[in-house]
Image (cartoon, rainbow, N blue to C red):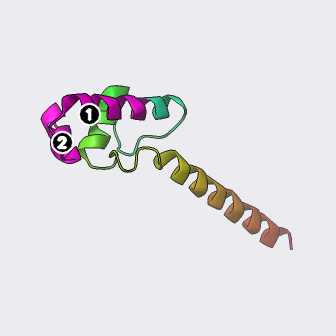
């Protein structure tokens, strides 16, 4: 994959404020360290993967705090589906 630049990220967030970008990236890194999966594929360092998420438009100021909640909902739905599948198999 091509190199990621700060300019790519600034374009994606629609803001030319590097300090805002830093705050967004730091919050997302905190989420990763708490177990949130990356939204882009790759095997780079944590910061590079986070910047790729931002440049791809998958992490924004609007959704940064909703991402963990969405994952919890998806996990709960997945667990419920597995339980219903197990119940159907045992019946």
Q: Which residue corresponds to the image point at 33% horizontal and 27% vertical from the top-left? A: 47
Q: In the image, is 84 to the left or to the right of 68?
A: right
Task: Say the numbered circle drawn on residue 85.
Answer: none
Residue 86 location in percent, x, y?
78, 64
Q: Nearer the viewer, residue 38 or 72?
A: 72
Earlier-in-chain disc, 2 versus 1: 2
Q: Which residue corresponds to the image point at 71% horizontal and 62% vertical from the top-left? A: 80
Q: Which residue corresponds to the image point at 40% horizontal and 50% vertical from the top-left? A: 63
Task: Say the numbered circle drawn on residue 21.
Answer: 1
Residue 49 location in percent, x, y?
33, 34
Prevailing secondary structure of the magenta residues: helix
Check disc 2 and report its element: helix, strand or loop: loop
Q: In the image, is 79 to the left or to the right of 40?
A: right
Tell me which segment is drawn in magenta: 1-29
Asked if labels 1 and 2 touch by Cβ distance under 8 angstroms, the answer is yes
Q: Quadrant of the N terminus?
A: top left
Check disc 1 and report its element: helix, strand or loop: helix
Q: CA distance from mark 2 to mark 1?
A: 8 Å
Residue 31 location in percent, x, y?
48, 34
Binning the other alpha carbons within 10 Å of mark 2 as few (below 14), some (14 to 19) or many (20 upward) gives few
Name the residue tied to disc 2. Answer: 15
Q: Nearer the viewer, residue 13 or 39?
A: 13
Q: In the image, is 67 to the left or to the right of 8?
A: right
Q: Is residue 5 in the magenta section?
A: yes
Binning the other alpha carbons within 10 Å of mark 1 as few (below 14), some (14 to 19) or many (20 upward) gives some
Q: Quadrant of the C terminus?
A: bottom right
Residue 37 location in percent, x, y?
47, 40
Q: Nearer the viewer, residue 79 or 71?
A: 71
Q: In the image, is 21 to the left or to the right of 71?
A: left
Q: Nearer the viewer, residue 7 or 46?
A: 7
Q: Is residue 29 visible?
A: yes
């Amino acid at each position: 994959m091509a190199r990621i630049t700060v300019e790519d990220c600034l374009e994606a967030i629609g803001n030319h404020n590097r300090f805002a970008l830093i705050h967004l990236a730091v919050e997302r890194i905190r989420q990763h360290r708490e177990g949130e999966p990356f939204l882009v594929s790759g095997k780079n360092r944590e910061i590079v993967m986070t910047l790729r998420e931002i440049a791809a438009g998958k992490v924004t100021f609007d959704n940064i705090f909703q991402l963990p909640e969405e994952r919890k909902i998806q996990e709960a739905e997945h667990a419920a589906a597995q339980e219903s599948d197990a119940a159907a198999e045992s019946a």
